[in-house]
């Protein structure tokens, strides 16, 4: 294919010839062979994929480079919103668990103990420690202390930028250092959120919903809340709470119920009857065991981690949607966390670096009998 001078907007004519997988460029149709250059078409494809070369053999900025610096072409009649729009993320760990705050950066593990007591019978057939005024043998008390140790792993992210990047970002009004900081905060919150609810499978650590100490698990009595009646849904919730209450030796009734977002929508969107003006959610809150035993309505909250693996949640705790009942108290269940710290700003040639770090533990389910999980909701 030949291009004449009239075909290009330049005073120097350029012709390109394609032959047997080769592409030849010339400065003009009458240029000498010494000024002509040939290149394989496969090399051209590779060049187009990675960027373009200028006349001085320097690489230009491709689209990805321009996007990372925040330099966009803005038209005269275009109004660019300068606000920072972060990725959407549902982070609820601060709502659902208390922190264990006595841990520090120097600690490598967190631990707690559970004590069990035993005693022989004072009088046969009676469990009380009876003794006579002339007794020569008094029953003794047995004690067994078990310790649970969990690791406190270091979490760290390094932020860096060059001085030219800072200068360009300042001129554009989009500070690269501030945006990277906001990204780091989001990463911290997302990592803590996952660690609290489901732990980390690669490290063999568990969260509150799949804790290895949690034994009160199973399927709901009725399940399939999409077609269940309000009475059946209440029966499912009451059965779970009754089971946890029994497992805790009737010492306490759960005060909080986490459900998957789909089931939560069903609770909010369904009325107690065709003539009623109250949702199933309010009906369960008012008629739960918590309202009678604890003196306040059951706190029901949605939790994305309870979506089943059959419903698009690859890290769900069950194949189907689930609900989790527990008591939100630091002495019963807590999460060891060392807050983020930062190193002083460090200079390396024309770069600035700063590292943020902290420690994330594993959920301590001190009293596993005070929590329960039921699946099969949908």
Image (cartoon, rainbow, N blue to C red):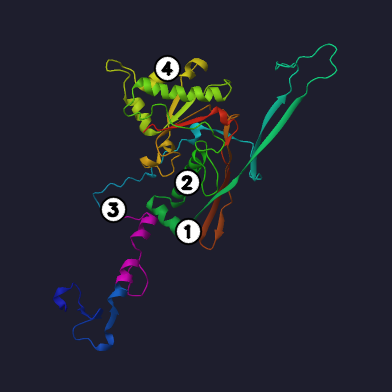
Residue nearest the observer in this picture, 156 or 28: 156
- Viewport quadrant of the C terminus: top left
Residue nearest the observer in this picture, 140 or 205: 140
Label 3 or label 1, whichever comes before in sequence order: 3
Question: Depth-wise, is mark 4 or mark 1 nearer the camera?
Answer: 4
Position above or below: 283 against 143: above
Label 2 or label 4, whichever comes before in sequence order: 2
In magenta segment, residue 51: yes
Q: Over which residues does the magenta segment extend?
A: 45-73
- Element carrying mark 1: helix
Label 4 or label 3, whichever comes before in sequence order: 3
Q: Residues within 10 Å of mark 4 (few under 14, many from 20)?
A: some
Find out whether the residues at labels 3 and 1 contact each other: C-beta distance under 8 Å.
Answer: no
Q: Residues within 10 Å of mark 2 (few under 14, many from 20)?
A: few
Say whether residue 147 is left or right of residue 42: right
Label annotation for residue 74? 3
Question: Which quarter of the figure has residue 261?
Answer: top left
Residue that mark 2 sits on: 187
Residue that mark 4 sits on: 286
Question: Depth-wise, is mark 3 or mark 2 nearer the camera?
Answer: 2
Label 4 or label 1, whichever comes before in sequence order: 1
């Amino acid at each position: 294919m030949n291009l004449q001078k009239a075909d290009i907007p330049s005073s120097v004519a350029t012709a390109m010839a394609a032959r047997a997988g080769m592409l030849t460029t010339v400065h003009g149709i009458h240029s000498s062979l010494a000024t002509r250059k040939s290149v394989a078409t496969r090399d051209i494809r590779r060049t187009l994929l990675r960027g373009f070369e200028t006349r001085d053999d320097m690489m230009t900025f491709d689209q990805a480079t321009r996007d990372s610096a925040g330099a966009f072409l803005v038209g005269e009649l275009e109004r660019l919103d300068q606000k920072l729009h972060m990725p959407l993320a549902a982070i609820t760990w601060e709502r659902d668990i208390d922190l264990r705050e006595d841990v520090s950066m120097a600690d490598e593990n967190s631990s707690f103990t559970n004590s069990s007591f035993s005693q022989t019978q004072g009088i046969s057939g009676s469990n009380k420690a009876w003794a006579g005024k002339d007794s020569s043998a008094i029953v003794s008390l047995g004690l067994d202390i078990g310790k649970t140790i969990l690791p406190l792993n270091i979490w760290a992210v390094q932020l860096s930028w060059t001085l030219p990047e800072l200068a360009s970002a300042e001129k554009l009004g989009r500070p690269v250092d501030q945006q990277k900081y906001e990204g780091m905060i989001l990463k911290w919150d997302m990592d803590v959120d996952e660690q609290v609810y489901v732990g980390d499978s690669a490290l063999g650590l568990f969260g509150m919903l799949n804790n290895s100490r949690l034994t009160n698990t199973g399927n709901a009595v009725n399940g399939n809340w999409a077609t269940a009646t309000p009475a059946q849904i209440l029966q499912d919730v009451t059965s779970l709470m009754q089971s946890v209450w029994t497992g805790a030796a009737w010492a306490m009734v759960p005060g909080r119920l986490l459900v998957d977002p789909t089931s939560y929508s069903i609770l909010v969107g369904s009325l107690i009857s065709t003539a009623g003006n109250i949702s199933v959610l309010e009906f369960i809150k008012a008629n739960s065991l918590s309202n009678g035993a604890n003196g306040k309505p059951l706190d029901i909250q949605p939790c994305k981690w309870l979506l089943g693996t059959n419903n698009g949640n690859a890290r769900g705790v069950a194949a189907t949607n689930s609900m989790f009942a527990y008591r939100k108290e630091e002495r019963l269940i807590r999460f060891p966390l060392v807050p983020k710290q930062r190193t002083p700003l460090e200079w390396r040639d024309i770069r600035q670096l700063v590292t943020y770090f902290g420690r994330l533990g594993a959920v301590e389910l001190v009293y596993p009998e005070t929590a329960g999980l039921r699946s099969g909701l949908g």
